[in-house]
Amino acid sequence: MTISADHTAPHSTSTEAAENALTEAVKKFGITVEDYMLPARHQIQMVDPDGRLIPESEQGTQPGHEYPVPGDDELLAAYERLVVGRRVNDQNSALVRQGRMAVYPSSHGQEACQVAAALCLSDADWMFPTYRDAVAVMTRGVDPVQVMTIFRGDWHGGYDPLQCKVGIQCTPLTTQLLHAVGVAHAAKLRGEDTVVLAMCGDGATSEGDFHEALNFAAVFHLPVIFFVQNNKYAISVPLAHQSVAPSLAHKAVGYGMAGERVDGNDVVALLAVLDRAVKLAREGSGPLLVEANTYRMQAHTNADDDTRYRESAEVAEWRAKDPVTRMRTYLTDRGLLDDDGEVRIREKAEAVATQLRDGLSEDVAVDPQELFRHVFSAPTPQLKEQSAMLADELARDAAASSSDQEAAK
Ligand SMILES: Cc1ncc(C[n+]2csc(CCOP(=O)(O)OP(=O)(O)O)c2C)c(N)n1
Ligand SMILES: [Mg+2]
């Protein structure tokens, strides 16, 4: 993708306008552009793995990277979503083993990222998820069964992206970032108040599309948050073989946008960082990149054996940083959650699991000819030929089964 026209002119009026908008936006948050642009020296963490709120003095905060703790209601709502998300991940993995779903890339261990990604957005905003972000889509309010039907493999997607303002979960790596940038560009041209959250993994940051999306968003000063869930692996490829950048958040700087890194298993820090990122983008700061430092606790999908490329000790180390138990301890210690509250939340999670089991256990009648629809506006000669072959095969199958039935009478 080549960016042409006057946007490449040295210090064009539009560049100056963008710089002024950035300065004004960050000023509202008491930050200077200098402090804002570089990621903090350490990841932002507010609640440690033992569920203890880290006092501000110990947070190692530096100018421009201090975040207020989100309100109690937001934290309780987030915890409920974490518990539901964990239950959904585990239910879906079980449904795959039962043959009710074809595949499920679980976000077990990454639920804090999933929940915060959805809760930081308002209704008019857009989310562009990957295949691993089903819990985020569901947390945004899309019906769980509709979200999961894509993994049953009988249709391209179960929900209407325009209605939900959520892109279809993308399997071709990183293409969703380009869709996200396109929507943000269109919204900006139309003068709409829309922030776009574009999600991807650590491996996806090596894709060419990642570069094109970030560069375009920065040059056109678009309200996009690139939310990178660094779960340390791209299938079997560890992060060290993927990138030697100081952090994935530092990649932002090369494009002229701010980057921040945050503990991706600490939903409190995630909400604080993403809430501010969304507000900044809405105020006209231009795009931002947030890297969440997390871990994929299970195999890439059910088709993968993770014991072939990582040690169980590493997985155990991350189990101790679990986002759900950490939040439960924090809320319980603060007196915001008691046993009754926990039971109520677990019942809600069970209800969603039941909804999934019921919804995904229904057999659906699919028309095999749908394979050929919605690919090209006018089908190619090859597709027409293949569609005719399929029609012929289906007709022969139908004839054979009706003559079998006659013979059985
Ligand atoms: C364009 C493209 N290349 C390769 C693949 C195969 N592939 C599927 S998932 C994956 C790893 C992606 O890793 P990451 O971005 O870290 O996301 P994660 O699965 O860890 O959430 C690869 C290489 C693909 N789907 N699309
Ligand atoms: Mg990854």
Image: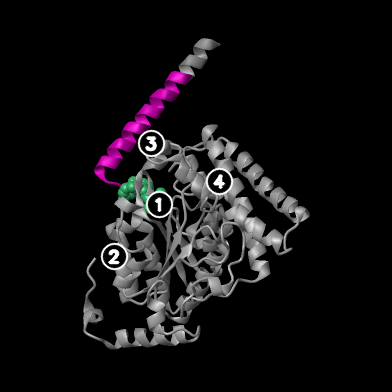
The stretch of residues the image draws in magenta is 376-401
> In the rendered image, which residue does mark 2 sit on?
212
**On screen, residue 145 above or below 336:** above
Q: CA distance from mark 3 to mark 2?
A: 34 Å
Left or right: residue 259 compared with residue 74: left
Location of residue 99 in the rendering, given as x and y in whole percent from the top left corner: 52, 32
- Which type of secondary structure does the marked residue at label 1 adopt? loop
Ligand 2 under 8 Å from disc 1 Cβ:
yes
Residue 168 placement (x, y as % from top left): 45, 54
What residue type is disc 1 on? Answer: Lys
- Vertical placement of residue 29 versus 345, above or below: below
On residue 89, which mark appears? 4
Marks 4/1: CA distance? 19 Å
Q: Disc 2 and disc 4: Cα gap in Å?
A: 32 Å
Label 2 vs label 4, nearer the camera: 4
Chain-order first, disc 1 or disc 3: 1
Q: Secondary structure at mark 4?
A: helix
- Residue type at mark 2? Glu
124 sits left or right of 230 in the view = right
Picture residue at 45% right of the left edge, 41% below the top? 299
Q: Which one is earlier in the sequence, the residue at label 4 or at label 1?
A: 4
Which quadrant of the view contains residue 314? top left
Tell me, yes or no, if residue 273 can be seen here. yes
Of residues 340 and 209, the one nearer the viewer is 340
Q: Where residue 232 is drawn, which disc sits there?
A: 1
Q: Which mark is residue 308?
A: 3
